[in-house]
């Protein structure tokens, strides 16, 4: 039987992370499954976890009065879901809905923040992995906004 530590290191987000950190990070992880159509989290609720997607697709949605729920991005296998656990007040800014059955590793945010506080080297290693993803998603959002205004 494989351990959580060996499983999580297969995800692109953690490939090559220092082995000394793997067991620590794995202690905050669990396997989760969300059926198609179910919400993984909702806008305005506490960001108590982040997810490494193993299988399936997740639609990130925002509500607009004129459009209703609008998909702004779709994430799939080997991607990360839920960055709001990193920044106070730790609240989600959008809805995440399983577009198809999703299998993922869920990391308890409080557990992981506590471990990062106890060992800043782990926190730094994780931040070096999160920041490029955040920048890429910010750039994608900027391009979407530009497209919206170009059509107006």
Image: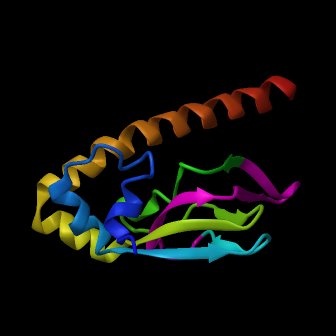
Range shown magenta: 44-72
* Left or right position of 30 against 125: right
Instruction: Give me the residue at 39% from left, 60% from top.
Output: 8
Q: Quadrant of the N terminus?
A: bottom left
The residue at the far front in this view is 1
Percent position of residue 144, x then y: 70, 33
- Residue at x-position 72% and y-position 57%: 61
- The reply, left or right, for residue 146 in relation to residue 135 is right
Instruction: Name the foreground residue: 2 vs 23.
Output: 2
**Residue in front for this viewpoint, 45 or 64:** 45
Determine the image quadrant of residue 85.
Answer: bottom left
In magenta stretch: residue 51 = yes
Q: Position of residue 90 (x, y in %)?
A: 42, 68
Residue 133 appears at what percent x and percent y? Answer: 46, 40
Q: Image height check: is 110 above or below 105?
A: below
- Secondary structure predominantly adopted by residues drawn in magenta: strand
Give the percent coordinates (x, y) of residue 34: 67, 74
Task: Using residue 145 as the reference point, say whether residue 118 is left or right of it.
Answer: left
The image quarter in which residue 135 lies: top left
Q: Nearer the viewer, residue 32 or 37?
A: 32
Question: Is residue 69 inside the magenta stretch?
Answer: yes
């Amino acid at each position: 039987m494989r351990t959580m530590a060996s499983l999580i290191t297969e995800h692109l987000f953690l490939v090559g992370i220092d082995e000394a950190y793997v067991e620590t990070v794995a202690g905050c992880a669990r396997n989760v499954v969300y059926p198609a159509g179910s919400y993984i989290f909702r806008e305005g609720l506490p960001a108590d976890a982040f997810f490494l997607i193993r299988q399936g697709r997740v639609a990130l949605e925002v509500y607009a009065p004129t459009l209703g729920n609008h998909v702004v991005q779709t994430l799939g296998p080997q991607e990360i879901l839920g960055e709001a656990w990193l920044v106070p007040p730790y609240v989600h800014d959008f809805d995440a809905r399983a577009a198809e059955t999703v299998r993922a590793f869920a990391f308890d945010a409080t557990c992981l923040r506590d471990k990062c506080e106890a060992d800043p080297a782990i926190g730094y290693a994780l931040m070096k992995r999160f920041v490029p993803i955040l920048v890429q998603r910010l750039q994608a959002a900027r391009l979407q906004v530009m497209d919206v205004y170009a059509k107006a």
